[in-house]
Amino acid sequence: MAAGWRGSARLVFLFQKHHSCISQSQNFNQFVRISLQFSFVVHSQKAMTGHPQTDLGLYKPPQTVRGMTELDRAAFSQTVSVPAIRIPTQVLNKVVKGLKKVALQRPGLKRVVEDHSEDGNTYSSKGEHRLLLLDPNNITYADSFGSEEAEALKAYGVPQEIHKYQLKLTYENLKSEEILRAVLPEGQDVTSGFSRVGHIAHMNLRDHQLPYRKLIGQVIIDKNPGITCVVNKTNTIDSTYRNFQMEVLAGESNMVAKVRENGVLYEFDFSLVYWNPRLSTEHERIVSLLQRGDTVVDVFAGVGPFAIPAARRGCEVLANDLNPESFRWLQHNAKLNKVDRKITSFNMDGRDFIRGPVQERLPALMKGSHKIHVVMNLPALALEFLDAFRGLLGPEPDQSLSCLDDNLPQVHCYGFSKEDDTQRDVVERAEASLKISLQGQCSVHLVRNVAPNKEMMCVSFTLPRGVLYSTHTQNRDISEEPCPKKQKCEDLTD
Ligand SMILES: C[S@@+](CC[C@H](N)C(=O)[O-])C[C@H]1O[C@@H](n2cnc3c(N)ncnc32)[C@H](O)[C@@H]1O
């Protein structure tokens, strides 16, 4: 009988655990699927055991808060009855340890309290006892202790007698999901996931959540220490500069964020530039390929998450961005991290950058022994920009040298794909822009899942001589290009 209750409670816990991580990743479909699975299992358990319903309502705020659009924290207060066990103070710590799996756990709540009777008199005037509050999802009756807890009680001579304790629950003791579930219309998704950018929580609310957006913003600030501003995205990210338009929902309207990524500090105005905290692993992956003395050409540099760590690693960096604000913050971040002497920055279109400053410097760099890495992170368009390399260095300077293994640039170019075969798709698009086959000369890395059926990929390859020198590339079809090594494109995805 008791085991059945503990089983249900464990499922509830699992549900909460899944729910919180899924709301962070905003994977709504998965959330719905898991919610349905769990609600079914919990329901079946009840039917099987025939027990009265577990008091899952303990964490439900009063019904009166439903539909609230202006946050009234006091309206969430309520007194609920919870089970408690009376423990002699001399053995308190040991017994609490033995019962920790069934004890009440709530943010900001003490689970060991003074031993008061319901009319306010102390049971043990000399303070010889305390009450340990128990989770009503785990414990309802005296016989609902499991063998582990029963043994702990027996060992210290504590009777398995359950007391009722009138507990005052307030807004402070509730989690954000519980608050929002109580306020928003019943049955609607309350996912409150956000991306954190310094002190800013960045949300992407759904239409049905919009009437409650100010309240949602305030709850996010209350429940997440360090967040002092909550914004909601009001457009899709298809602006040229890849920044979001956003509405401040709650808190200060200061958009200048300070962010630490992979140990490097960045500052920028989040409303005017692109920043995505989900790219930190990718930034680190590319930077880990670099050696001191290498040159990094960052065509779509943003505020510097490839350029700054590359410079800190001892590379020479050419960093470009079309957005004047990104360019300004890139320079600011270079100074902030004391690498401004290693970075030459440009504020121009990516093609003009490749065909101008990069073209000027490339012949000399290719004569050196240090590697040249070209990073192109504008996944919606970058694969198309690869055409800028075609014939970049003009006719082959000396045909007799063409068989020499030049120090050719390594390109890391990003693309989104919604195709079934995402690897093949991005490689084919790179080939179409370069007008050359990359068979056997590229690797493809899955960066992240951006949306259902949309992946961000990175194609890495050595820029073929046949692309850089015009005599080899002009008007030539992919099928004409010989494939030096017939080897499948390597998938570096784990
Ligand atoms: C997806 S963001 C990447 C920023 C940065 N590299 C990162 O990893 O976070 C793409 C950047 O390309 C810039 N951009 C957009 N179109 C451009 C163009 N035609 N030429 C150069 N930069 C461009 C945007 O301003 C934005 O900063």
Image (cartoon, rainbow, N blue to C red):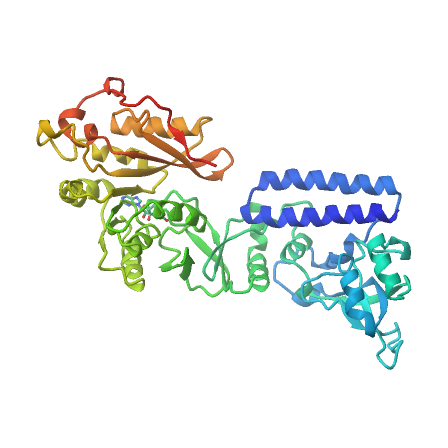
Question: Can the viewer see residue 353?
Answer: yes
Q: Nearer the viewer, residue 64 or 223?
A: 223
Residue 53 placement, left or right of 458: right
Q: Residue at x 44, y 26 (%)?
A: 421
Q: How many marks?
A: 0
Q: Position of residue 276 (x, y in %)?
A: 42, 50
Quarter of image, res 487: top left
Q: Which residue is outermost to the top?
A: 480
Q: Position of residue 407 (x, y in %)?
A: 20, 38
Residue 162 placement, left or right of 451: right
Q: Nearer the viewer, residue 297 or 408?
A: 408
Residue 139 placement, left or right of 279: right
Q: Residue at x 24, y 43 (%)?
A: 371
Question: Can the viewer see residue 63?
Answer: no
Q: Nearer the viewer, residue 247 or 426?
A: 426
Q: Which residue is outermost to the bottom?
A: 126
Quarter of image, res 44: top right
Q: Nearer the viewer, residue 347 or 414?
A: 414
Q: Residue at x 69, y 47 (%)?
A: 14
Q: Position of residue 172 (x, y in %)?
A: 66, 66
Q: Is residue 219 above or below residue 388?
A: below
Q: Residue at x 61, y 62 (%)?
A: 70
Q: Position of residue 285 (x, y in %)?
A: 39, 45
